[in-house]
Image (spheres, rainbow, N blue to C red):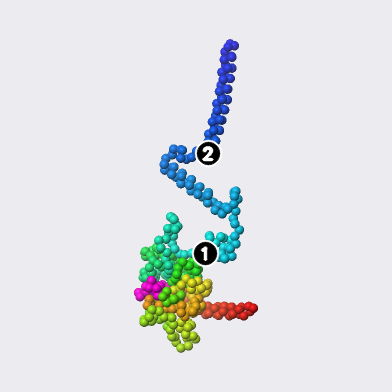
Amino acid sequence: MGTTHRSGVLKKSNDGVRLIVTTIMGMVFGYFVGVSFPSVTFSKITLPSRLMSSLDMAFADETRNVRRSFPENLGSGSIPVTPKIFVPTNPRGAESLPPGIVVSESDLYLRRLWGEPSQDLKSKPKYLVTFTVGVEQKRNVNEAVKKFSENFQILLFHYDGRTSEWDEFEWSKRAVHVSVRKQTKWWYAKRFLHPDIVAAYDYIFIWDEDLGVEHFNAEKYIQLVRKHGLEISQPGLEPNNGLTWQMTKRLGDREVHKETEEKPGWCSDPHLPPCAAFVEIMAPVFSRDAWRCVWHMIQNDLVHGWGLDFALRRCVEPAHEKIGVVDSQWIIHQVIPSLGNQGETENGRPPWQGVRDRCKHEWGLFQDRLASADKAHISQLQRTP
């Protein structure tokens, strides 16, 4: 009996020692594994190649994002340090930015959603052409667009809200489309053709939709404009179609003309409109610098632009030399009142009549505002010591 009791006690004692030793060894082993774990990399783990590639890409992207999270962190430690900047020559509102990051001008170039940004553009159009259009005139506009090469960016302003019907034309897929119902081209121009937005283009064409272009070539037109130093111009008009002023009448014996003779009493000075320094608003072409001035003269609420043609001379100097009509590249004004039909019938009057009345009223308002602005400015100059 005694021998049996001592054997049981000895067995329990050995088991306890073994448990203690095993626990200690496990702790030591765990310590060394923990110390060595940071040096373990994904490349030492055998994984399928596709999974390994995905992990590498994810890890690289995450690392890149972390590194670029605080590009302005110019200090040490974990607190970002942004330099205090005030550059008075920066554009208004951007004085707190370093000049190197300021982009004050833009363009209408179409870009991809993928790839390297520097490789987006195969070419950069030098000129901008805008048409204010309705779908009923799409055949006519299509013929007009064909006259412009890839050097010209096409921009369509849709006053009828219908854009998908233009997809049948291949060029339409490369054009810029802006759609707002029942608005005029000068309303669009004031809001979407800010000089800083179209600064990339040497010349800006702001054309109506009802122009016949059988005798017009855009590249040759640009050559003549440059040759004769025209900052504001238009193609000559076929004498028997839609002609209002003698100045815009095509002369068949020359490339360009800059002055004409009007009815007796119409011109107080041969160098002033409508005898010189004058083009109409149906198909004007502006240089970049001239447009920067003209844009500021367009009134937000005077959407038809009537009267603007007589004031264009204020934007170039000398106006009678830098405004002219290109005769050898001429167009036909078809006088289609499509935009006029976008008006509303009132008191039994047709829609176009209300639109025409608004045009005439705006002309008077513009003249009054310009005269008042001149008077106020002169008065201010006289008061300045």
Q: Distance between the Cα atoms at labels 1 and 2?
A: 49 Å
| Residue 346 on image: x %, y % | 48, 76
Q: Which mark is residue 104?
A: 1
Mark 1, Cα crowd under 10 Å, few <14 / some 14-19 / many 20+, is few
Q: Horizontally, is 380 left or right of 298 in the view?
A: right
The residue at the point 38 percent across, 65 percent down is: 171
Residue 283 seen in the current view: no
Question: To which quarter of the image does residue 203 belong?
Answer: bottom left
The quarter in which the C terminus is drawn is: bottom right
From the image, tell me which residue sits under label 2. Answer: 38
The residue at the point 37 percent across, 74 percent down is: 216
Q: Which of the two labelled residues, at mark 1 and mark 2, occupies the earlier sequence position?
A: 2
Whether the magenta-drawn stretch holds residue 157 is answered as: no
Q: Which mark is residue 94?
A: none
| Residue 10 on image: x %, y % | 58, 17
Question: To which quarter of the image does residue 258 belong?
Answer: bottom left
Q: Horizontally, is 385 left or right of 244 in the view?
A: right
The quarter in which the N terminus is drawn is: top right
Residue 246 seen in the current view: yes
| Amino acid at dot 2 | Pro
| Residue 204 on image: x %, y % | 45, 71
Front position in the image: 306 or 219: 219
Q: Are marks 1 and 2 in contact (CB under 8 Å)?
A: no
Residue projecting furthest to the top: 1
| Amino acid at dot 1 | Ser
The residue at the point 44 percent across, 63 percent down is: 109
Whether the magenta-drawn stretch holds residue 217 is answered as: yes
| Residue 74 on image: x %, y % | 58, 53
Range shown magenta: 207-224
Front position in the image: 251 or 13: 251
The residue at the point 59 percent across, 80 percent down is: 378
Q: Is residue 268 above or below residue 347?
A: below
